[in-house]
Amino acid sequence: MTSKRPLKKIEEPHWNFEAFRNFISFEVLQQACSALRQHEGITVGEAASDLRHLNSLLFERTGLEWTPDRVPGGNVNWETEGSLFRNKKRLLTSMYLIDLGAYEDADKLYLTPLGRALGEGRVGRDQFYDFVISKFGFPHPAYEENWSWWTSKRRELRPLLFILKLLLHLSQLTGQLTEVSIKEVAFFGGPNPETKDSNDVAKAIAKYRSAPKSIKHKRKDSHDRKIGDMFGFLSMTKYAALGKGGLVLNPVRQELENKCRSWISLSEIESELDNLGRL
């Protein structure tokens, strides 16, 4: 399906990521998938009663309103315009939770193996975040412009893993945990990156910091805001935390069995990220 998609001429890469911060935590998505699991196979555009029940069940289980906050009027059809598939479909497909092909080709709701396992309680918190960090990449079929640019340039980027590795390389260069800002990632890493370039981008940031010059950076929604949303997502994981000036690696690990916390080294973090890269 995606290989047949016509390519648009896009001048810059798109770092797409969903801005629905309240909806992307493990706890919320797990409960959402449990509700979606009960409605697999419905025809999204026609199953009015099923959609009403699904919307009600999503609110009941997550405490969040998944439908747009709007009052339909004129020729607006509430069932299509006001359902979660109008408002949150891209979130669910970008996180690899519902089958994009089944939705676009047949207007059907089917969960992916990840979404089904998540809804059935067979995926733990760390497993979920590890999967998304390792899997989420560009070109991404859920975003047309993103797919067009990255495919036309024949480049690939796993942005969440890229940011974590960038943080690791910066910390290794300085010998201590080091923050990175949205502006630095957008300026030095945003224009033309690949996942393997994280070390070179870290060196460029370190060089700039050693002899700071004015960065002529114009904030762009397609980079800065999306990178900020990625920072927010990564701060939900065990690997990173939000600091005063940006994102920083989190060396604290908590053992679930004995509820003890431990402090791991940069070399141990490096091993963790290498493992993510192999998933």
Image: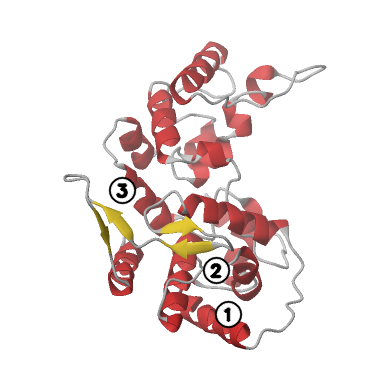
The residue at which mark 1 appears reads as 205
**236 or 192: nearer the eye?**
236
Which mark lies nearer to you, 3 or 2? 2
Residue type at mark 1 is Ile
x 46%, y 70%: residue: 167
Residue type, numbered disc 2: Val
Question: Does residue 158 appear in this view?
Answer: no
Q: CA distance from mark 3 to mark 2?
A: 25 Å
The image quarter in which residue 263 lies: bottom left
Mark 1 to mark 2: distance in Å? 9 Å
Residue annotated with mark 2 = 180
Gap between marks 3 and 1 measured at Cα: 31 Å
Mark 3 closeness class: few <14, some 14–19, many ≥20 residues within 10 Å: few
Badge 3 marks a residue whose secondary structure is: helix
Q: Is 6 left or right of 259, judged from the image as shown?
A: right
- Label 1 crowd bin: few (<14), some (14–19), many (20+), radius 10 Å: many
**Residue type highlighted by circle 3:** Gln
Query: How busy is the neighbourhood of tag 2: few (under 14 within 10 Å), some, or many (20 plus)?
Result: many
First in sequence: mark 3 or mark 1?
3
Q: Is residue 230 above or below residue 31?
A: below
Q: Secondary structure at mark 1?
A: helix
Residue 119, located in which quarter of the rendered image?
Answer: top left
Above or below for 211 versus 245: below
SS at mark 2 in the image: loop
Say the numbered circle drawn on residue 127. 3
Q: Residue at x 31, y 36 (%)?
A: 117
